[in-house]
Amino acid sequence: MSDKLIFKKDGRMDEVRQAKAEGWYPYFRPIEAYHGSRVVIGGREMIMAGSNNYLGLSHDSRVKEAAIEAIREYGTSCSGSRFMNGTLALHEKLERELSRFTGKQAALTFSTGYQANLGGISSLLSKTDHVISDKYNHASIMDGIFLSRGLTGGVQVHRYPHGDMQRLEKVLAAIPEDEPKLIVTDGVFSMEGDIVDLPSLKKIADSHGAGVYLDEAHAIGTIGATGRGTMEHFGSTDLADVVMCTFSKSFGSIGGFLAGDEDTIEYIKHTARSLIFSASMPPANIATVLKTLEIIEAEPERIHRLQRIAVKMIEGFRTIGFNIGSAETPIIPLTIGDDAKTFLLWKALFERGVYVNPVISPAVPANRALLRTSFMAIHTDEELDTILNVAEDEGRKLGIV
């Protein structure tokens, strides 16, 4: 370890070293192979109940072939930013398809979903503007807000308790009507698995002249009759001004996009630092999204199967006695509260062949430690029953249920 002060950090690494020594460190576990809804870790096959591959498309043979063909035609990288030599005809084709899919005038792709939020939010917010955020919004949303504050020095940040529309109304009422305002929210919240009350939020936003920026990372592919996300779930494509989504969940790739009116997207295209100063999305990943988008539209039964699975697992965990909060999607948290018990249950499930994700502070508030379970359309009923049975058995041993 260096003796320079800049490299002397707090004691968190002591906890990591202890966890590794005691055999319950749960993170960075290398996956050796994928077999549909199962993975191989440490030479053992396990049921994957912690992936965001909601529609199971990342290993679809048609999707893999599309990626391979794109590499044959375009190579492995664009080797430049979108501004310079990094825009392919494939980028623009995908953006046209995404604008149509979301019901917006235009779309813009980024190399990661994180970069889409960094670029979109920081471009839209100027000095003296107001941004209003749900306290449970994803970290990439908050980092986009922090970047905007760093760039302008004057953005005013307001946060309201999770899902509290009355508090949101009060926050907006306290801001002068003639000052620009942007409400930013997840559609489906990544740890809670619940859905924003978007109609109420939009009504409040309109009454105070605020824009609505909607992060659909965990909503597109999981909710709505055809998987188009939160706006479709509530029956209107006019419930958000700007829509953001990642490609690393239902689309089985990596990257992200923003969609909105043409002028707004064109402005972001020419001002977003995470777009301008980053290499563009590689050909294989673009082709992957184009193919998965085609499959999503052609095979709505995938979305319907996933939604039935969500109902089954929500009812199953709740009946067992787990605290799953207000989950209503394929993301179902098993909230335990105590960090030690959370890791003990994680280890017990892992040893019995069920992979889930333990989540503690700062990813969730202190004393809200949980196991994040998430499900795919390709899970079988037998696998789902196994997950429930193992969780109940181990949960009872630990006194959690």
Image (cartoon, rainbow, N blue to C red):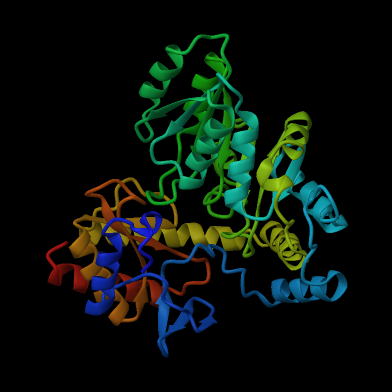
Query: Is 277 positioned to the left or the right of 2 in the image?
Result: right
Query: Is 279 positioned to the left or the right of 245 in the image?
Result: right
Determine the residue positioned at 20% across, 73% down.
394
Determine the residue positioned at 73% across, 48% down.
98
Q: Percent from the top left, x then y, of residue 330? A: 44, 57
Task: Pick whichever, 310 or 113, lies toward us.
Answer: 113
Displayed quadrant of residue 389: bottom left
In the orientation shown, which residue stands out farthest toward the bottom? 43
Query: Is 255 positioned to the left or the right of 158 in the image?
Result: right
The answer to whether residue 34 of the structure is visible from this angle is: yes
Q: Percent from the top left, x then y, of residue 325? A: 29, 48
Q: Percent from the top left, x then y, of residue 114? A: 57, 50
Determine the residue positioned at 71% across, 64% down.
285
Task: Pick whichever, 319 or 367, lies toward us.
Answer: 367
Q: Quarter of the image for the C terminus: give it.
A: bottom left
Displayed quadrant of residue 237: top right
Q: Quarter of the image for the N terminus: give it.
A: bottom left
